Image: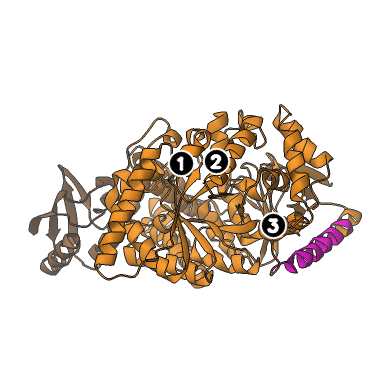
Amino acid sequence: MVEENVEVQLKTGLQARPAALFVQEANRFHSDISIEKDGKVVNAKSIMGIMSLAVRNGASIKIMINGNDEADAMKALVDYVKKE
Amino acid sequence: MSQSLTGIAASKGIAMAPAFILEQPDMDIQKKSVSDVEQEAARYKKAVATAKEELTLIKDKTLKEMGEDKAEIFSAHLLVLEDPELIDAVEAKIKEGVNAEFAMKEVSDMYVSMFESMDNEYMKERAADIKDVSKRVLLHLLGMENTSLAEIDKETVIIAEDLTPSDTAQLNLAYIKGFATDIGGRTSHSAIMARSMEVAAVVGTKEATSSVQTGDFVIIDGLEGTVLVNPDEKTISEYKEKKEAFARQKEEWAKLINETSVTKDDHHVELAANIGTPQDMEGVLANGAEGIGLYRTEFLYMGRDELPTEEEQFEAYKSVLEKMDNKRVVIRTLDIGGDKELPYLDLPKEMNPFLGFRAIRLCLEKTDMFKTQLRALLRASAYGKLSIMFPMVAAIEEVRQAKAILQEVKEELTAGGTEVSDAIEIGIMVEIPSTAAAAEIFAKEVDFFSIGTNDLIQYTMAADRMSEKVAHLYQPYHPAILRLVKNVIDAAHKEGKWAGMCGEMAGEPTAVPLLLGLGLDEFSMSATSVLPARSQIRQLSKKEAESLVEEAMTLSTSAEIAELVQKRGFITEEM
C-alpha cells in the first residue's frame, strides 16, 4: 500500500478530457487505486467517480494504491497530474 | 393516407425519401424480482458487451468519416460503459434479486441526478452522456431496436423532435437528404447546420414526429416550409418537377459566380459570406462571395477543454485570409456567453445571460485570453485583407479600451520584428440598441459597422426569439428596426465609413430591397444565399429601392412593410 498527497497542476484539473485520460492511465495497472479529496474517496478507475470529485487546478488530492504494481502506478499517476 | 404539415423553411432544397424517425423509445421499466440472479447478471453482462461492440463500431466509423473531434464523444461513452463503479453497483443490485433493467436504471438515474445537480456546465453535459449510454444498454436488455444516425446507409430523410449537435455530427450526407423537426426556428442550431450542409430542412412543424412513421415516404420542401407524408403519385411527380426546376434555378445562379453584384442603375454592393470555421471556405468560394463579412471565431473555442493556443488561431485565420486572396475578411473577436458557454472558463451563473457577461465585456476583463486572440489576428494580417470586429459593443469606452489593447499588442509584435499589416480596419458589431441609436458617436472612432440583426431585433423588441409565446414580437421589419438600421448606415456614411449587415436578415429576399434602398454597403449571409441575392440585386434599381424605403417609412407595422415589398414586386425570386 502506497499513498501520496499531490497538488493537481493540470490546467483544467481532473475534469473533462484530462479526467478520461487519467482513468485510462489508471486502468493500465492491476493494483486497486483510489483517490481522496476533501474526505471523499473514489475508485480511480471510474470515470464517474473521478468526475464526481470535480478536482480543479491547484486542488490537493491523495492517491492510494494497493497491489503488485503500486510503485509504477504511483509514479505514472503523479507524473500525470503534475503535468501543466 | 397522405398528409401535409407546415413549418419554417430552414434550408433550401427538396428532399424525397423514406423517413427515419429519430425518437426517444418508450421504455417502461418495472421492478421485478428474479430468482436466478446468476442468469440475470449474465444477461446484464451480455447487454453491456453488445453495447460496447456497437459503440466501438460507431466510434470507428465516425473517426474514419468525420474525424477525431466528432468521434471523441463516443470514446467518452465507452469509458462510462466500462466504469467499474457503475458495473459493480448494478451487479450488487442484481444480486439482491432485482431485474437487470431496473438495477441499471436506478444506478444510472442516481449518477445522472448527481451530475445534473453540479454547478458546472461540463458536468451537466456528462449527465446526458450517462443517459445516452444507459439507454443503449437498456434497449439491449429490453430487446428493442437501437439505430443510430451514423448507421443509416440508404437514402433517408430524418424526422426528429430536434437535432442536437451530437446528432448532426453523425449525419452522413451521402444518405441523409434532408430533415424535419418538431421544434426550432430559422436560427436554431439544426437550421444553421442544414444550410451549411446544404440539405433541405423544415423546422418547427410541431407535429412531425407524431404524424410520420419510419418508412413513410416523405417530401421535405425547404423552399416553402412544408412536409408531405405519403403523397400520391401526382404530387410526387409535381415535386420531381419542382426539384428539377430548383436544380435549374441553381444552375442559373451558378452562372453569376464570377459576376459583380450591381443593380440595374449601376450601384455596386458587396455580397459576403458568414463562416464559422476554415472548412466553410469551400462553400464560400463555390458560391462566389465577394468577401467574408463575419468569421465567428467562437467555434475555435468550443467543444474542447481549454483555450485554443495562439498558434492554432493564427493558422485558422491565416488559412481563411489566404484563401480569400486579398478580398476583405471580417473576423469577429470571441463572442461567448449568452447561449454559448465555455465550460472551462467557469463563468458565473447569471439571471439574464443575454444581458450579462459576454463577448467584448468578457474579453475586456479576461485580457490574457483577448490578447492571445489579437496577437494571432495581427500576425495573420500579413496574409490578406483583415478587418477586426468587436461584438456586443454598448458604450464608446469599450471601443477605446479594446483599441488600446490592440495597439499594445501590435507594438509588442512589431517591436519583436513580427510583420503586421498597417491597413487593418477596426469595426464593431451594431447589435445593441444604444449603439444603433448613438451610431454617429461610434462612427468617428471605428472604420466600419456591421449590423447584427438577430440580437438587434431581440434587444430592441425585448423579445426572446426562442420563446414561442413572444416570437411574434420578433419583427425584422418593425418600424423601429428600420429606423435604427437607417440611423446606423447614415452615421457611417457621414463619416465616410462603410456599413454592413451580418445577421440572417441580410440574405432575406424581403429585406434585400429595403437594405439596398437604405444604402447598405455590404450584405453578409450564409454562403448559399449569396447567388440568389446577387440575382435579385441585379434585377433591382437603387432609385426604386429608395422610393420603396420612403414609402415603408410611412407605415406602422412590420407586416405592412413586408407586404409593401411584396406588393411592389421587389421580390424577384420565388425560391
Q: Chain of mark 1?
A: B
Q: Is residue B310 left or right of residue B5?
A: left
Q: Is residue B316 left or right of residue B208?
A: left
Per the rendered image, the range of residues in magenta is B238-257
Q: Position of residue B281 (x, y in %)?
A: 55, 67
Q: Residue at x 33, y 54 (%)?
A: B406
Q: Residue at x 84, y 57 (%)?
A: B239
Local packing at callout 3 (Cα closer than 10 Å; few below 14, some 14-19, many 20+) is many
The residue beneath circle 2 is: B491
Q: Quadrant of residue B215?
A: bottom right
Which sits in the foreground, B571 or A49?
B571
Which sits in the foreground, B327 or B209?
B327
Q: Amino acid at mark 1?
A: Phe
Q: Position of residue B104 (x, y in %)?
A: 41, 47
Q: Vertical placement of B482 versus B255: above or below?
A: above
Mark 2 and mark 3 lie on one chain; the one further toward the N terminus is 3
Q: Which mark is residue B442?
A: 1
Mark 1 vs 2: CB contact within 8 A: yes
Mark 1 vs 3: CB contact within 8 A: no
The residue beneath circle 3 is: B157
Q: Vertical placement of B551 versus B362: above or below?
A: above
Chain A, which colour?
A: brown
Q: Position of residue B226 (x, y in %)?
A: 76, 47
Q: Amino acid at mark 3?
A: Val
Indicate whether residue B467 is drawn in magenta.
Answer: no
Chain B, which colour?
A: orange
Helix, strand or loop status at disc 2: helix
Q: Quadrant of the C terminus of chain A?
A: bottom left
Q: Do badges 2 and 3 share one subunit?
A: yes
Q: Disc 2 to disc 3, how far (Cα)? A: 47 Å
